[in-house]
Image (cartoon, grey):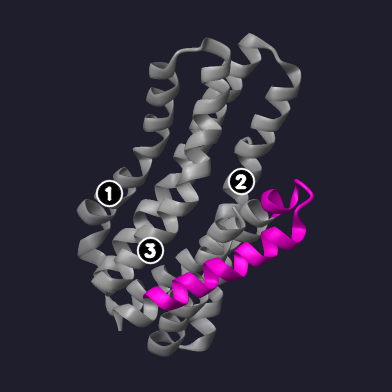
């Protein structure tokens, strides 16, 4: 989780936000950065938090509650994943190499999300197929976001709008990193390992960016 946070933080600042500042200006880039953070914060507050819900349902050891939690988590992640599809779409329009880097960052982030959906459902039902199905349905929202971005938003994309979208996306990814990934990585008493992993994630993303230039 710490490694994933480092990857997302580095790509947010070094590629997405920096690109928006250079091409569209410091003020507009910052406005949309904070708008992105605010948007995902509202989603996060309105939808049950996947890791907190998972932890709570494990403690309760209740069959029906585990199923209910798994379904709520699946819904929450689906809503949360939708803008990530837009993230990859806008990044790839800007630069195919950037799209590839975003793919890596989001894929790392999605691994624990898939586990957080499938684990409570499998624990309650002992049915691998059900656990996989709900995890898959929550993840399919991501390509759906990309499809909608292409079919609806693509005709309206100008260079300025694209850069603002990248800054907006950077705000989303930073909020996810600081509000979700990093706190969870620190929760289990291995703070030094979590922070070390964070910087390793940043270093790996820096290395990838250097190779792609």
Q: Is residue 131 magenta?
A: no
Q: Position of residue 107 (x, y in %)?
A: 41, 52
Under circle 3, the secondary element is helix
First reached walking from the N terminus: tag 1 or tag 2 = 2
Under circle 2, the secondary element is helix
Under circle 1, the secondary element is helix
Label 1, label 2: how far apart the Cα atoms are: 22 Å
First reached walking from the N terminus: tag 1 or tag 3 = 3
**CB contact under 8 Å: marks 1 and 3:** no
**Residue labelled with disc 2:** 44
Q: Is residue 191 magenta?
A: yes
Question: Is residue 98 positioned above or below 173 on the image?
Answer: below
Name the one closer to the observer, 46 or 174: 174
Q: Position of residue 60 (x, y in %)?
A: 75, 18
- Numbered circle sitting on residue 148: 1
Name the one closer to the observer, 147 or 183: 183
């Amino acid at each position: 989780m710490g490694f994933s946070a480092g990857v997302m933080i580095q790509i947010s600042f070094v590629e997405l936000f920096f690109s928006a500042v250079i091409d569209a200006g410091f003020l507009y880039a910052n406005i949309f950065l904070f708008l992105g953070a605010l948007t995902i914060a509202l989603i996060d507050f309105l939808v049950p938090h996947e890791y907190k819900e998972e932890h709570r349902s494990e403690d309760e050891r209740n069959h029906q509650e585990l199923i209910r939690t798994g379904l709520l988590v699946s819904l929450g992640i689906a809503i949360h994943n939708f803008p990530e599809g837009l993230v990859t779409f806008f990044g790839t329009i800007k630069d195919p190499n950037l799209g590839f880097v975003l793919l890596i960052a989001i894929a790392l982030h999605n691994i624990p999300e898939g586990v957080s959906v499938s684990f409570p459902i499998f624990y309650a039902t002992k049915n691998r197929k059900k656990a996989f199905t709900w995890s898959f349905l929550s993840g399919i929202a991501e390509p759906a976001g990309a499809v909608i971005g292409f079919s609806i938003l693509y005709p309206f994309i100008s260079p300025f709008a694209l850069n603002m979208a990248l800054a907006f996306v950077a705000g989303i990814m930073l909020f996810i990193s600081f509000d979700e990934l990093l706190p969870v990585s620190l929760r289990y008493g291995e703070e030094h390992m979590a922070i070390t992993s964070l910087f390793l994630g940043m270093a790996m993303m820096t290395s990838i960016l250097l190779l792609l230039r």
